[in-house]
Amino acid sequence: MFLLQVVVVLLVAVGAGVLLVLTVQHESSQDASHRTLAVAEGFANTPGVARAITSPGASEVLQPRSRAAADGADVDFVTVVDRAGVRLTAAIPDLIGRHTNQDMAPLLAGHTVQSKAVGSVSPQYRTFVPVRDDEGRVVGAVGAGVRTSSVSDAVSRQMPVLLGGAAAAVAVITGGAGLISRRLLRHTHGLGPAEITRMYEHHDAVLHAAREGVLIVDGDGALLLANDEAHRLLDLPKDALGRPVRELGLPAPVAELLTSNRTATDEVHLVGGRVLAVNQRRTGTDGGPPGSVVTLRDSTELKALSGRAEAASSRLELLYQAGLGIGTTLDVTRTAEELAEVAVPQFADFVTVDLVEQVLAGDEPGGGAVRSFRRAACAGVLEDHPLFRPGEQLRLTETSPQVRGLLSGHAVLEPDLRAAGAWHRQYPERAREVVAYGITSLLSVPLIARDTVLGVVNFWLSEDSGTFEDDDLALAEELAARAAVSIDNARRFTREHGMAATLQRSLLPSGLPEQNALDVAYRYLPAQTNVGGDWFDVIPLPGARVALVVGDVVGQGVQAAVTMGRLRTAVHVFSALDLPPDELLARMDELADRIGQESGSAESDQGIMGATCLYAVYDPVERRCTMARAGHLPPALVTPEGRVRFLDLPAGPPLGVGGLPFETAEVVVPEGSELVLYTDGLVEERGRDIDEGLAGLAAVLAGARGCPEEVCAAVLDTLVTPGRSADDTALLVARTRVLPRERVARWEVPNDPAAVADVRTAVSAKLAEWGLGETAFVTELILSELVTNAIRYATGPIGVRLLLDRQLISEVSDGSSTAPHLGQAAATDEGGRGLFLVAQFAERWGTRYTSSGKITWAEQQLPTGYAGPRGVPEGSAAHPA
């Protein structure tokens, strides 16, 4: 067979070579004819050739050109002849002037002549083309020729390539035939037909001896082959071969699968009480007969393994659910409840979580052996169980399963609670109730995180659910470990949140100072997850005025509370200087920027991340409110008629940004109006535009009636959802009052020392009218010293104002911006003791600046029991949150 293949290959190669040579020769001859035609036509049509043929000395002109054309076109010669057939050019110069043997008649008639002729050197392929002058007359002809030897040379040059290609083809085909023959010999091991037949018999025996069923079904659904195992598994009849599968009495799903020719992998089917795994693959996809090959495997014994695999899968699912469901909040009790809820009923019928008392409070558990716990969570498939309820305290013995687990650091299994003596001795009566209820198995796991004992989690199974196994220990410990980390995180957060809340409440005002200008109520609500940096303040100022402050520090936690305390203290310090609101915010901005720079240079995180502030000063005498804000939301003004508007104040940059000045705005406030100051936590919420929050606040304020305390309650009840606030909320509602005219006295004082006596007389009369005659001497002394000081050292108009509020307030105004200073006069000095006397007799005194100068003021306490001409106005009550 191999030699026959080689002979056939050689014959094919030789025939192909001969055919290729003939083809190359024919194509070379055609190429020679075409080349001579192209050269002759190109030269004949060259400009000047026709004129040169008819001109004297034609040979001298055309000979060089013809030689160059022949060399460039790779032809043997280019010859030009005249009408008489005389050569004007020739490859051999001696032939110039002789007649050519070419018949001129066809050329003179305008035809091209191609021929194969014998030339002076060798046979040639010739082509002659007529040459026409400008009038179309034939004046001569141009001929080009190629020797036949040139064509033979081209064929000879290609022969090695042809022969080499043929030899290579013979070698490749012969090698391939050899490899195929060797592969066949190797696969058949040199066996002949008899041996191969015997081998088929052996394979058939193996097929029927295999413990896996094998079926072959044709494209029409008829059974072609079934081994013995297939007969046994499917209970096939003896004459099953050749019959349609649907007539063999198989279950409908199996018959449908065998006749469907679809691919199946480990499909499980129930046949005669057996669980069979069926695999099926189609045949005939490469052009062969259609059908399918089916294998059957008895998987009845794998059913138990499948059950265990399903249990393992459910445990993995439980761990996945635990990862998602435990630790969603930073609340210790809620985290314990999540642990119990995740494990019921997937892992246990009942779950109880007992935590150390300090953990529930967010504190660090004490050292030593833990014996006392408080139940934090309990979940079960039924609600009427006798287990201890959440909130109850448990004191456990050293031999109890829970304490043994804590001492060992691993889960402790009590498979049968009826025989668990140590567990019964803890609470005998409760233990009997639990067993009688049907709870018979306990798995106790310690909750330990970062080497800190947090408590224990107990998994309980009822009698109907079986008992815990050793495989459950690892799962229970994994659940407990994950829950312990979440509980410890919640504990640490609870501690930090408590510290921050305590710190912030200690930094916020515990009550409101006494004053008569405003009736104030306030609310402060910390964020649900952590406290922030919101603050508020009510600061009495000289002249019966009151300052209202609301601010918000960016961030949450202890750092935000500390920053808030620093800013609040700074506001108190700057307000004591009686600075205008814009200048006070400018000082606050400088302070915030300085703190930020110092913190940045120290590479610490104690700086101010950002803060907003609103500072307003209300004067009950003039009913004027002066305000400025640093990036804070504008205040709301509610008129006595219930109209609400947000005051249009220049916003100003937040504190610490700098670069832009703050601006002050003034508004005259009708008596009985309400000034509402708030932080963004009241009106801003995720998913809601702040304009919607402001509109909601305006609607509540427009409909709220009653005292400021009731207005605060209405606003919070409407706008804040209890337990869901993500940011702090601070709210101040201040209802304005006006100091009655009869409690204000004013005098203009001439710039004359003699006018001091008139002031003393007028003041004495006004005090007598107010029923304060006994304070006249001190008040006259204070005012006389302040007026004298203004006349002596100040400029501009001088005015005196006397206010009767909670104190008796004396004020002297002038046009000078120089503040008086308290000095120590020597024993020999005649003056310098005026301010010293003022400081001695007044409760407090000071100076504040105005746009036109300054005001020097002094306050005196009213006599005990003084009721005033019409009774002293009642002060505003502090309304705590």
Image: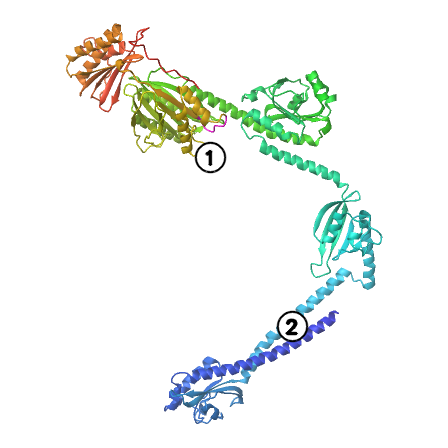
| Residue 687, numbered label | 1
Q: What label does residue 668 carry, if any?
A: none
User: Toward which corner of the image does residue 538 lie, by quadrant?
Assistant: top left
| Residue 480 higher or lower than 820, as above or below | below
Q: In x, y percent, where is residue 94?
A: 45, 91
- Disc 1 secondary structure class: loop
Tag in front: 2 or 1:
1
**Highlighted magenta segment, given as a residue range:** 723-728
Q: Earlier in the sequence, mark 2 or mark 1?
A: 2
Q: Is residue 215 magenta?
A: no
Q: Mark 2 touching mark 1, by CB under 8 A?
A: no
Q: Is residue 492 visible?
A: yes
Q: Is residue 724 in the magenta section?
A: yes
Q: Residue at x 82, y 53 (%)?
A: 240
Residue 716 image offset from top left, x and y in percent: 44, 24
The residue positioned farthest toward the front in the image shown: 641
From this viewpoint, is residue 778 visible?
no
* 412 displayed left or right of 94: right
Is the magenta region chiefly helix, strand or loop? loop
Q: 431 and 502: which one is in front?
A: 431
Q: Amino acid at mark 1?
A: Gly
Q: Quadrant of the C terminus?
A: top left
Amino acid type indicated by mark 2: Ala
Q: Circle 2 is placed at which residue position?
A: 167
